[in-house]
Amino acid sequence: MTISKHGNFENPKKSPWNFEKFQSDLERRMMVKLEADPLVKKWMKRHGITIPWIDGQKHQRRYVPDFFVEYVDGKKEIIEVKDPSRIDSNDVQRKRKAAEIWCRQRGIEYLMATV
């Protein structure tokens, strides 16, 4: 189960911002991982990306993925971190499908991670 932990990740070296906000310990751990990865050129949570998706009641929604990452080889990726217990929920799967299509249309990879 995800520990609900909010805070600021101060002075990241690979983000264009002087801090990034996290809404869970999973997000914070992903920030640490991205900072330490020598293949990551830059990453950010405040990326401005919103992806439209349709919920189970056929309502249009907007989804803001957790991370946008650019690697030293030029590859770009959207990363969504989720507690393993939530991955199979209908809304998570609908958002995932919409994000995969959105990313594919733009030459970006999509990853759902449990850190």
Image (spheres, grey):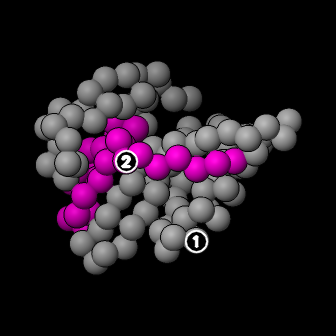
Do residues under tags 2 and 1 come within 8 Å of each other at their CB atoms?
no
| Disc 1: which residue | 105
Badge 1 crowding class, 10 Å Cα cut-off, few under 14, some 14 to 19, many 20 or more, is: few
Q: Is residue 9 above or below residue 111?
A: above
Residue 28 appearing in the image: yes
Instruction: Locate residue 83 relative to residue 52 in the image: left or right.
Output: left
Q: Is residue 63 above or below residue 43?
A: above
Secondary structure, mark 2, is loop
Q: Is residue 30 left or right of residue 66?
A: left
Query: What residue is rendered at 58% in x and 71% in y?
Result: 105
The N terminus sits in image quarter: top right
Spot occupied by residue 49 in the image (x, y as percentages of width and height): 46, 49
Calculate the distance from the C-alpha at mark 2 to the C-alpha at mark 1.
18 Å
The answer to whether one can see residue 56 in this image is no
Q: Counting residues from the N terminus, which is met first, the one under dot 2 or under dot 1?
A: 2
Q: Position of residue 75 (x, y in %)?
A: 37, 73
